């Protein structure tokens, strides 16, 4: 009887783990959200720019590009957004009217222009 209990418990744990792993952390709420991802590049050289501030206008949402110039803004409600990109010694850049729908991952490539000396 003890052996059957142990095997049953192990199977329940295994099945629960498999179900949770298949979920990838998504809930009903996050499936109703949208994402904006992108890459920030220097307009002249084409090099990836790390550390660029990406701000969603009229929100508290801010992120920064990684070492490859990539960024992700997660869990946005469906709608239209404007983003502002700022980086030292570069002109601010604006991307306006980015429309995202439920479950969508909008991909952008943004080129920043160096300020003239």
Image (cartoon, grey):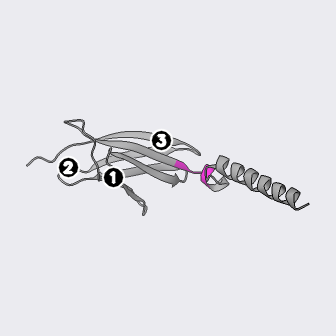
The mark nearer the N terminus, 3 or 2, is: 2
Q: Which residue is mark 3?
A: 106
| Viewer can see residue 27 | yes
Q: Which residue is mark 2?
A: 90
| Viewer can see residue 32 | no
Q: Secondary structure at mark 2?
A: loop
Give the residue displayed 66% in from the left and 46% down from the top: 22
Counting from the top left corner in percent of width and height, residue 23 is at 66, 49
On the picture, is 8 further left or further right than 69? Answer: right
Is 112 a magenta residue? no
Identify the magenta region: 30-34
Label 1 crowding class (10 Å Cα cut-off): few <14, some 14-19, many 20+? some
Q: CA distance from mark 3 to mark 1?
A: 16 Å
On the picture, is 50 further left or further right than 56? Answer: left
Considering only vertical position in the picture, is 108 above or below 66?
above
Give the residue displayed 65% in from the left and 49% down from the top: 21
Give the residue displayed 54% in from the left and 42% down from the top: 104
Q: Secondary structure at mark 1?
A: strand
On the picture, is 79 further left or further right than 40? Answer: right
On the picture, is 18 further left or further right than 104? Answer: right
Q: Which residue is mark 1?
A: 84
The mark nearer the N terminus, 2 or 1, is: 1
Counting from the top left corner in percent of width and height, residue 40 is at 31, 43
Considering only vertical position in the picture, is 35 above or below 6?
above
The mark nearer the N terminus, 3 or 1, is: 1
**Answer yes or no: do the residues labelled 3 and 1 have beta carbons within 8 Å?**
no
Q: Who is closer to the viewer here, 25 or 111?
A: 25
Residue 57 occupies which quadrant of the picture? bottom left
* Number of the label disc, if any, that sits on residue 107: none
């Amino acid at each position: 009887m003890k052996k059957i209990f142990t095997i049953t418990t192990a199977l329940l744990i295994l099945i629960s783990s498999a179900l949770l792993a298949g979920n990838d952390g998504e809930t009903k709420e996050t499936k109703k959200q949208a994402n904006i991802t992108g890459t920030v590049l220097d307009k002249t050289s084409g090099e990836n720019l790390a550390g660029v501030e990406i701000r969603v206008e009229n929100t508290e949402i801010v992120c920064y590009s990684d070492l490859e110039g990539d960024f992700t803004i997660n869990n946005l409600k469906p709608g239209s957004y404007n983003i502002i990109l700022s980086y030292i010694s570069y002109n601010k850049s604006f991307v306006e009217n980015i429309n995202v729908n439920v479950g969508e991952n909008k991909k952008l490539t943004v080129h920043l222009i160096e300020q003239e000396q």
